Amino acid sequence: MEALDLLEPQLTDDFLPLNGTDYLELYVGNARQAAHYFQTAFGFQPVAHAGLATGLRDRESYVVQQGKIRLVLTSPLHGDSAIGRHLDQHGDGVRVVALWVDNATKAFEETTSRGARAFMEPTREQDEHGYVVRSGIHTYGDTVHVFVERNDYSGPFLPGYEAWNPAYRPTDVGLKYVDHMVGNVGWNEMNKWMQFYQDVMGFQQLVSFDDKDISTEYTALMSKVMSNGNGRVKFPINEPAEGKKKSQIEEYLDFYGGPGVQHIAVATDNIVETVMALRDRGVEFLTVPDTYYDDLASRVGPIDEEIATLRPLGVLVDRDDEGYLLQIFTKPICPRPTLFFEIIQRKGARSFGKGNFKALFEAIEREQALRGTL
């Protein structure tokens, strides 16, 4: 059983109150096809669109949503553009992690006064639906945080976007919200970015894992989980550790061309139904040996789900002092072996599946070996 010294929220000292994740913007090679993929495979619903028809000349974006998870999929309309250069270096991936705040100007002032490098000065954007204020700061690699103040806006997404209402609307698969988002950084950079989130954004270290916790016969990594004051935003930060072979973090850094978002963990209330629906739509998951389930009952204790149901799906289970969780990881969803998704269901547990690390990373190593990158 995993014992965690979890820190309690300290809202009175929270100089950067966050309401949650507002949206994630992914730069992709073909936004229209990416939107179709997330609708078809993951059950996201169409929300808004911006491009030539709305007056944009440099990019096209599609917004899709499921529960509280909002993705913005953006592609460039011309060569030799900032978005195009980002794609050349990184491939498809997360550029913007947008955070919902009540006051984007104050969020900008609080973070830049503490050392953050400005990405976007506070900017008021408005249309017939009201106004939004956005600001932003740089973080690891080319990833940025944008603060979004939208209390006085009733449009479909942001000013400059129009509602997108296609006839094609596959049903959702039960995804609810972003549970956490993992960033990969370079050698010996984890503590630097842990300090950044602590000093600049007021986050607390929730838990840490060293190379003894996250290692196999061949590879290792280290991780620290940072959480904001109310616990609604959690960012684990990974760095490589020495091992016999190239770790998944090193592989990521090589193919992404530097630090960036490795995976997005999205929550569901029924992981069995969600995973079955995703599999039926063609989403591929990492698999663990069937023997993982032989001693599962003795390792995690009583659970509501039947092990015979979890076994063919490949769903992992772990327990901490407050309950248990179920989780499963997709294979990379892009041509480069970088971005993937985690599906997670929490039943009391506030941890991150430490008991599954060995099985999970051995599964990743099997995929690395198939790619010839281990």
Image: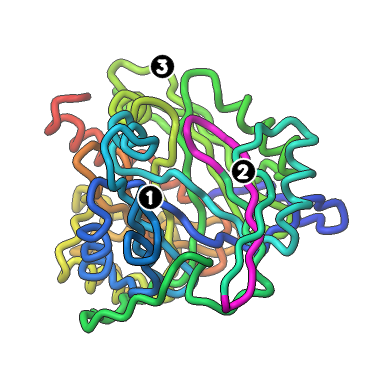
* Circle 2: residue type: Met
Q: Which residue is mark 1?
A: 26
Callout 2–callout 3 Cβ contact below 8 Å: no
Whether residue 140 is in magenta: the answer is yes
Front residue of 227 and 306: 227
Foreground: disc 2 or disc 3: 2
Give the residue displayed 52% in from the left and 66% down from the top.
Answer: 158
Position in image of residue 367 (x %, y %): 19, 37
The Cα atoms of the two marked residues, 2 and 3, are separated by 37 Å
Please provide the residue range marked out in magenta: 128-144
| Circle 3 residues within 10 Å: few <14, some 14–19, many ≥20 | some
Sequence order check, earlier mark of 2 and 3: 2
Pick the front one: 160 or 20: 160
Q: Nearer the viewer, mark 3 or mark 1?
A: 1
The residue that label 2 is drawn on is 120
Provide residue 302's location: percent of width, then percent of height.
Answer: 44, 69
- The stretch drawn in magenta includes residue 272: no
Quarter occupied by the C terminus: top left
**Residue tagged by mark 3?**
242
Q: Is residue 164 left or right of residue 235?
A: left
The numbered mark, 2 or 1, whose residue comes first in the sequence reads 1
Q: Earlier in the sequence, mark 3 or mark 1?
A: 1
